[in-house]
């Protein structure tokens, strides 16, 4: 266990090098947020009452919480790095060392998210402060706790799925197009663009049979009080099952891929 | 030294036309070397374009206007914005993202030594053919939206539209080139350059959604609200005054001049990397 602690430590030191880059990323990330919030404001200004059961404050809070959850859980460099490690033959060394590549990568992912969140904290907090009139807080402490638990599961699910996608590099030379295609689906079906429950009800229901809502929408819906009671408990169990399934898939694909691996350049 | 008599008299830009022809040929050969990858990237772009349209589709399930924009007018706008973005991508985007790489590796030395304008060769070195293919799909969406709006643009409309598209592409190019020039100071400018992508999110929204500070900022400082809105409004007969046209054309010239000044200023700070 101690060796992974070291990995985490090294990961933090390595990503600290990119802190300015992270800051720019966080700042530029606020631009689409401004765009979406302005768009919804104009829509609410043009009509009376709620839109699809969302008040203006709930709608704006939705996107603000999305930004928070995203900075805590989104995979943004790890999949490219894993694919490059495979393509360039760098993983050979991990096959010889008493270290598990998945656990090693998970530590680096954790370190990256930690540093990113710390860097993004200032601009995001300032932005939320500007929007404080519309920022709602969770109903009670228990909701906040469930929200936090769900974020951890979201992060794991995001990581295991991205890890599995990156392992495609064992079979194909260029994985970036595949990653972008899956990302497009995550973007819309995960709730990045709009809350999933403003879709027609059968469509929302159908989406809940896929892992996408659990990659982002689910924790946010807990936060703004759209998922409560029995649905919350049940959702968390399903989210946990998806995490386990994604983990198993990652292990399976790895064991298949390693048989194909030819250690190019290593 | 006397010029050899065999060289016929040609206008000065002829050399650039010949060079650019050669660059095109190069790019085509390069793209065709990775055919499946070329096609997959087109799929990726199409998917993201469809995603934007889905977003608008979902929004208009719950409302029938954003400001004074109807559903098909917004679809037209998204098509126009995608068209401009794709043409920009075809000519400039990849080249601009390469600049920080040239600086980091010191390959810029080599570019500076070539007997052509350095900005010309850096900006236009590679052509991304996929951009043209995606431009066609954006065009198709625009045509469909116009049909839904029962509008039939005249030749003047189309020519005006194309002129405004050129101005929009010029704005995207100038601003991105300016950002890329920051690589002379920070080696890791790639993050900044890719951050430009998030500005496209503003360009495809109706200007009526913005008010106050953001409206002014994204019209006069970073004119994203002009780039696609003005051409789309021209086609949809939504222009309130010809001043908007002049503003877009004027801003494109201003952006180009500012980026040229920024580039020259940055270049003076260049201290080669490897040597």
Image (spheres, rainbow, N blue to C red):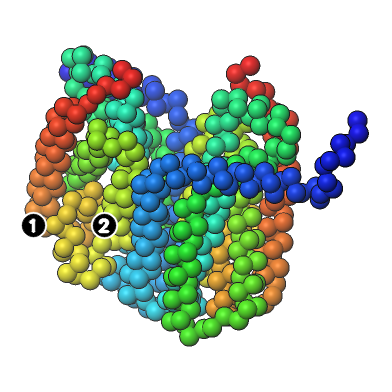
- Residue A168 visible in the picture: yes
Callout 2: residue from which chain? A
Q: Earlier in the sequence, mark 2 or mark 1?
A: 2
Q: Nearer the viewer, residue B106 or B249?
A: B106
Q: Position of residue B184 (x, y in %)?
A: 63, 31
Quarter residue A41 falls in: bottom left
Q: Which mark is residue B135?
A: none
Provide the residue designation for mark 2: A189
Judge the density around disc 2: few (<14), some (14-19), many (≥20) Cα neighbours within 10 Å. Answer: many
Provide the residue designation for mark 1: A230
Q: CA distance from mark 2 to mark 1?
A: 23 Å
* Relative height, residue A6 to residue A170 (above, below): above
Q: Quadrant of the N terminus of chain A?
A: top left
Q: Nearer the viewer, residue B32 or A147?
A: B32
Q: Nearer the viewer, residue A169 or B104?
A: A169
* Relative height, residue A94 to residue A25 (above, below): above
Judge the density around disc 1: few (<14), some (14-19), many (≥20) Cα neighbours within 10 Å. Answer: few
Q: Is residue A211 left or right of residue B38?
A: left
- Point out the residue furthest to the front here: B6
Residue at 69 percent of width and 46 percent of height = B18
Residue at 55 percent of width and 37 percent of height = B98
Q: Position of residue B255 (x, y in %)?
A: 68, 52
Q: Quadrant of the C terminus of chain A?
A: top left
Residue at 51 percent of width and 47 percent of height = B28
Q: Position of residue A247 (x, y in %)?
A: 14, 37
């Amino acid at each position: 266990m101690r060796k992974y602690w070291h990995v985490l430590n090294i990961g933090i030191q390595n990503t600290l090098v990119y802190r300015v880059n992270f800051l720019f990323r966080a700042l530029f990330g606020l631009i689409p947020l401004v765009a979406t919030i302005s768009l919804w404001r104009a829509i609410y200004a043009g009509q009376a009452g709620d839109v699809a059961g969302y008040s203006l404050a709930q709608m704006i809070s939705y996107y603000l919480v999305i930004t928070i959850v995203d900075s805590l859980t989104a995979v943004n460099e790890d999949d490219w790095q894993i694919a490059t490690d495979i393509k360039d033959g760098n993983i050979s060394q991990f096959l010889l060392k008493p270290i598990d590549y998945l656990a090693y990568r998970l530590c680096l992912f954790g370190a990256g998210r930690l540093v990113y969140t710390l860097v993004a904290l200032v601009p995001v907090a300032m932005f939320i402060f500007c929007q404080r009139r519309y920022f709602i807080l969770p109903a009670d402490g228990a909701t906040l706790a469930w929200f936090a638990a769900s974020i951890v599961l979201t992060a794991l699910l995001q990581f295991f799925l991205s890890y599995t996608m990156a392992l495609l590099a064992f079979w194909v030379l260029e994985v970036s197009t595949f990653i972008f295609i899956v990302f497009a689906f995550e973007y819309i079906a995960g709730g990045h663009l709009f809350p999933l429950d403003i879709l027609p009800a059968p469509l929302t229901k159908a989406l809940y049979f896929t892992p996408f809502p659990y990659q982002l929408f689910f924790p946010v819906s807990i936060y703004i009080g759209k998922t409560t009671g029995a649905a919350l408990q049940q959702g968390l169990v399903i989210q946990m099952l998806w995490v386990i399934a994604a983990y198993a898939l990652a292990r399976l694909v790895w064991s298949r891929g390693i048989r194909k691996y030819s250690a190019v350049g290593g | 030294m006397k010029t050899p008599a065999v060289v016929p008299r040609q206008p000065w830009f002829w050399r650039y036309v010949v060079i650019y022809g050669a660059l095109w040929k190069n790019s085509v050969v390069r793209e065709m070397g990775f055919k499946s990858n070329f096609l997959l990237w087109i799929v990726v772009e199409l998917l993201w374009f469809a995603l934007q349209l889905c977003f608008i589709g979902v929004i208009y399930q719950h409302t029938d206007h954003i400001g004074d924009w109807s559903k098909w007018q917004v679809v037209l706008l998204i098509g126009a914005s995608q068209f401009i973005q794709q043409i920009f991508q075809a000519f400039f985007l990849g080249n601009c993202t390469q600049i920080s790489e040239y600086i980091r590796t010191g390959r810029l030395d080599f570019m500076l030594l070539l007997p052509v304008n350095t900005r010309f060769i850096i900006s236009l070195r590679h052509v991304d053919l996929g951009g043209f293919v995606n431009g066609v799909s954006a065009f198709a969406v625009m045509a469909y939206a116009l049909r839904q709006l029962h509008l039939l643009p005249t030749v003047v409309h189309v020519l005006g539209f194309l002129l405004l598209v050129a101005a929009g592409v010029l704005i995207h190019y100038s601003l991105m080139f300016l950002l890329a020039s920051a690589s002379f100071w920070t080696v890791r400018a790639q993050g900044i350059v890719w951050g430009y992508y998030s500005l496209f999110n503003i360009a495809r929204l109706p200007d009526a959604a913005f008010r106050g500070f953001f409206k002014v900022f994204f019209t006069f400082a970073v004119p994203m609200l002009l780039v696609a809105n003005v051409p789309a409004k021209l086609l949809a007969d939504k222009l309130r005054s010809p001043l908007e046209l002049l503003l877009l054309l004027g801003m494109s010239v201003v952006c180009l001049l500012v980026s040229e000044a920024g580039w020259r200023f940055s270049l003076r700070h260049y201290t080669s990397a490897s040597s």
